[in-house]
């Protein structure tokens, strides 16, 4: 497709392109863990269609539509990005690719990376060739992330990394990991951290899966024993990794809240799903709770839109992303409580009539923990937005 | 749709309004009126009209500033912050929107009078303690060429002072809207002493004579006029309630920084920090629904129902939380009449009820969303 700047002209070109290129099997809006490609060397495509869809989108920059074309994106501004999502939704197209590289590392590299790093790391993310995971949390450093202890020593021609990460989602599936390490043990805790990129195939990296209450085991303990890392694999300045880490977290939080809020706007109303569960009848308490959830979902969806519009007008969301993360995830948990209640005993069977609902319900409980807990979000709002003391 | 960011003009309008209202109508203005047993300040309304506020939804041909619903919401929000007493909602928003639906000379003249600040209106719609615009018993019986109106209305906000009344009546052909002078023979107005110290009245109609001239729009087709007018009013009221929440919240956050107990500011206690932060999050989310409702009314009024009900239901909940937390976090002083928080709490309760409460609007949202 040619680069087209006018949103409506772009819409017609895109529509025609989608008509031609989006395989029928990819037009079912499926959301499960395997129905959207996560990419990486270890990814097994669910179908040929899934593979074709990824390749065709990647060739047009449509796996990362807003990234610059030089790094594998389509260079879309907000108006055309909106059109893109509308047209994808119109045909129920699955997202061609999702990953931590797209949501988290990409934005951080675009902001802090050198030109060489951008050209080296971003296009493989856009093509779905390299899958990344996030090495932030440690057994002793969760909410108090800046107290992390993973040691990174300057050995002249390389870095030497020793330590342990925990709760590393998909560490066993990922090709590379972005890691927060301590490069200065004397400095105040926020001032001795660096942000490094590390190949999971490096000697000395091991992972051990941990099972979640939802039955899945997508996250791991990750161990680093004398792992050598090339000097140029630091993003931003040495000892200034906290800036990169925080910037990335705002993107991670937006992504998590978008996941929760996204259920709102375009999709079907929760109340309609609940009512269908019960043959068109909803008891009054459940219906009232579903109304409240619907009102909140729509308003949170609009808030996501508003913040995107503000960002485009040059007014960054900054610390307000903590608000979106808190509101979106708490709502998502509530929505799944209602779904469980509506499903009754059907929703108590792992693979019963409601499908994966109980597992999804349990998984939503992590939404208000991962990427910073709700309490931590409220702390950010009270200190940085409201300026409360202490 | 236009973006969910305030335009430069909207930001300027808000700043200008704030500057004016801080001088002319801080909360102490409401207190003064209440202490004097009054429910209106004609001079203040005249000044607002001079600035173009009375004509904010009136076309330029009739002397209005015609800035639209999003702009009206911004003014209402600023008024809410200091609990301004004015006929803005009833007259400049609800009546102006109703009259705009009618393209005759009489409506044109009425709009002109509104924009000039020469005429105020009140909407007489409720007949029982809950908003229910579909259930009307006040009858308009056909007699000769005209009608005889009999029945009563309650909770007519601004109805004690308004020059004219928009009265929803049941005629043989269906619900009909009348535009009557409030001193027409047979109309008896009784001021009700409201918790928010604002004007409201119970109004009785006893053999009130009306002619075809007094009908707004067509007999039996009130909805064509009433629906847009109600939506405009509900959206602006939601904006006012959100401004009110912001006003109460601002006072509360200041107090958290200033009041000391146990040797530190109470805002250092995490239990209060998190509740304040939660409240701020709620106000941010509600603000989106408010701006969205204004944009919808400006761009696609025919399908703005969901957006408006969303705004009103969110605003009602947020204002309620803001005033409850506002009183609680001020401790004993929050309960005193000498302190302003009580005014916010009382206005929030009235705003919650007027033009449909949370339950009414959440129900509209549910229906619009298919359940
Ligand atoms: C499903 C899932 C996936 C994850 N994926 C990743 C990943 O890929 N990479 C990664 O690095 N990490 C990941 N995490 C880790 C996540 O970021 C941490 O779990 C989170 O930051 C909380 O840290 P913690 O578990 O140590 O809890 P703690 O920090 O020990 O918190 C325990 C409780 O104390 C509360 N608390 C802590 N401090 C305060 C305070 N100051 N005030 C009030 N309350 C407080 C918390 O809110 C929480 O309720 C994942 C977690 C989950 C659940």
Image (cartoon, coloured by chain):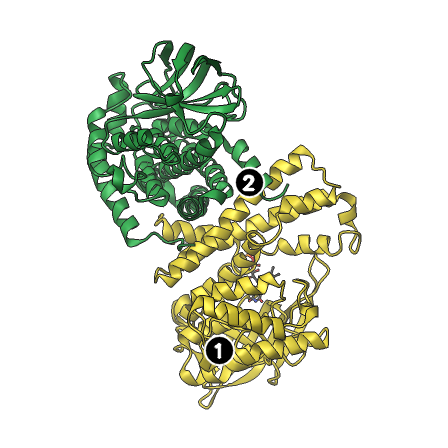
Chain colours: A yellow, B green
Q: Which residue is nearer to you in this view: A367 or A72?
A: A72
Q: Which residue is nearer to you in this view: A157 or B320?
A: B320
> Where residue A174 sits: x, y (%)?
62, 76
The residue at which mark 2 appears reads as B365
Q: What chain is tagged by disc 2? A: B
The residue under the point 49% across, 39% down is B309
Q: Which residue is nearer to you in this view: A390 or A267?
A: A267
Q: Is residue A376 visible?
A: no
Q: What chain is tagged by disc 1? A: A
Which of pointers 1 and 2 indicates the residue nearer the eye? 2
Real-space CA distance between mark 1 and mark 2, rounded to the nearest whole angstrom:
48 Å
Q: Could you tell whether B161 is left or right of A266 in the image?
A: left
Q: Mark 1: give few (<14), some (14-19) or many (20+) Cα within 10 Å.
A: many
> Where residue B5 sits: x, y (%)?
37, 54
The residue under the point 23% across, 24% down is B41
Q: Mark 2: give few (<14), some (14-19) or many (20+) Cα within 10 Å.
A: many
The residue at which mark 1 appears reads as A196
Tags 1 and 2 in contact by the CB under 8 Å rule? no
Q: Could you tell whether B366 is left or right of B101 in the image?
A: right
The residue under the point 50% across, 20% down is B170
As helix, strand or loop, the secondary structure at mark 1 comes to: strand
- Which numbered dot is residue A107? none
The residue most toward the bottom is A157
> Where residue A208 sits: x, y (%)?
68, 72
Indicate the quadrant where residue B147 lies. top left
């Amino acid at each position: 497709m040619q680069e087209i700047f006018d949103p409506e002209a772009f819409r017609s070109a895109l529509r025609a392109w989608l008509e031609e290129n989006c395989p029928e099997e990819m037009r079912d809006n499926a959301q499960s863990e395997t129905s959207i490609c996560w990419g990486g060397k270890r990814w097994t495509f669910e179908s040929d269609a899934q593979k074709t869809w990824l390749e065709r989108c990647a060739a047009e920059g449509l796996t990362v539509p807003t990234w610059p074309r030089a790094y594998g994106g389509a260079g879309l501004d907000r108006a055309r990005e909106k059109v893109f999502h509308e047209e994808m939704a119109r045909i129920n197209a699955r997202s061609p690719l999702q990953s931590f590289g797209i949501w988290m590392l990409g934005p951080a590299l675009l902001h802090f990376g050198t030109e060489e790093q951008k050209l080296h790391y971003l296009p493989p993310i856009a093509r779905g060739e390299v899958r990344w995971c996030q090495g932030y949390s440690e057994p002793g450093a969760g909410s108090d992330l800046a107290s992390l202890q993973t040691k990174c020593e300057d050995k002249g021609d390389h870095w030497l990394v020793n330590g342990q990460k925990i709760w590393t989602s998909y560490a066993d599936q990922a090709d590379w990991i972005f890691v927060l390490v301590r490069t200065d043990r004397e400095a105040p805790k926020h001032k001795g951290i660096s942000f490094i990129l590390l190949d999971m195939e490096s000697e000395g990296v091991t992972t051990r899966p941990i099972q979640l209450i939802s039955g899945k085991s997508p996250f791991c303990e990750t161990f680093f024993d004398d792992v050598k890392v090339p000097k140029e694999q630091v993003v931003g300045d040495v000892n200034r990794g906290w800036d990169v880490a925080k910037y990335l977290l705002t993107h991670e939080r937006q992504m998590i809240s978008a996941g929760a809020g996204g259920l709102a706007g375009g999709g079907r109303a929760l109340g309609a799903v609940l009512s269908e569960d019960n043959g068109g009848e909803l008891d009054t308490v459940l219906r009232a709770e579903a109304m409240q959830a619907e009102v909140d979902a729509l308003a949170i969806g609009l808030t996501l839109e508003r913040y995107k519009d503000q960002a485009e007008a040059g007014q960054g969301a900054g610390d307000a992303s903590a608000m979106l993360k808190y509101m979106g995830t708490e709502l998502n948990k509530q929505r799944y409580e209602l779904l469980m209640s509506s499903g009754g005993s059907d929703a108590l069977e792992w693979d019963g009539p409601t499908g994966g609902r109980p597992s999804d319900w349990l998984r939503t409980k992590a939404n208000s923990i991962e990427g910073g807990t709700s309490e931590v979000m409220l702390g950010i709002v009270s200190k940085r937005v409201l300026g409360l003391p202490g | 749709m236009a973006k969910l960011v305030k335009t430069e003009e909207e930001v300027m309008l808000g700043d200008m309004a704030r500057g004016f209202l801080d001088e002319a109508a801080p909360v102490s203005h409401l207190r003064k009126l209440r202490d004097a047993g009054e429910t209106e300040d004609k001079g203040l309304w005249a000044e607002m009209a001079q600035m173009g506020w009375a004509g904010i939804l009136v076309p330029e041909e009739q002397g209005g500033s015609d800035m639209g619903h999003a702009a009206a919401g911004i003014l209402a929000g600023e008024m809410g912050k200091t609990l301004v007493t004015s006929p803005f909602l009833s007259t400049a928003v609800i009546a102006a929107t109703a009259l705009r639906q009618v393209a005759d000379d009489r409506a044109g003249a009425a709009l002109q009078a509104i924009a000039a600040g020469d005429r105020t209106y009140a909407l007489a719609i409720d007949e029982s303690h809950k908003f229910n615009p579909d259930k009307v018993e006040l009858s308009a019986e056909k007699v000769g060429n005209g009608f005889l109106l009999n029945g009563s209305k309650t909770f007519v906000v601004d109805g004690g002072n308004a020059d004219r009344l928009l009265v929803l009546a049941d005629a043989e052909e269906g619900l009909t809207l009348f535009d009557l002078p409030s001193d027409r023979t047979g109309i008896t107005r009784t001021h009700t002493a409201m918790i928010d110290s604002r004007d409201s009245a119970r109004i009785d109609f006893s053999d009130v004579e009306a002619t075809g001239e007094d009908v707004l729009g067509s007999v039996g087709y009130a909805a064509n006029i009433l629906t847009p007018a109600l939506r405009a009013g509900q959206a602006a009221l939601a904006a006012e309630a959100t401004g009110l929440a912001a006003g109460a919240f601002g006072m509360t956050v200041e107090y958290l920084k200033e009041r000391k107990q146990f040797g530190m500011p109470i805002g250092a206690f995490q239990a209060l920090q998190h509740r304040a932060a939660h409240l701020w999050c709620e106000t941010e989310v509600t603000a989106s629904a408010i701006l969205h409702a204004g944009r919808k009314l400006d761009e696609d009024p025919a399908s703005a129902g969901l957006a408006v009900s969303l705004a009103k239901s969110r605003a009602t909940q947020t204002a309620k939380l803001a005033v409850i937390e506002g009183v609680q976090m001020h401790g004993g002083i929050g309960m005193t009449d000498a302190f302003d928080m009580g005014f916010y709490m009382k206005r929030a309760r009235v705003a919650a009820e007027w033009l449909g409460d949370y339950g009414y609007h959440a129900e509209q949202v549910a229906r619009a969303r298919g359940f």
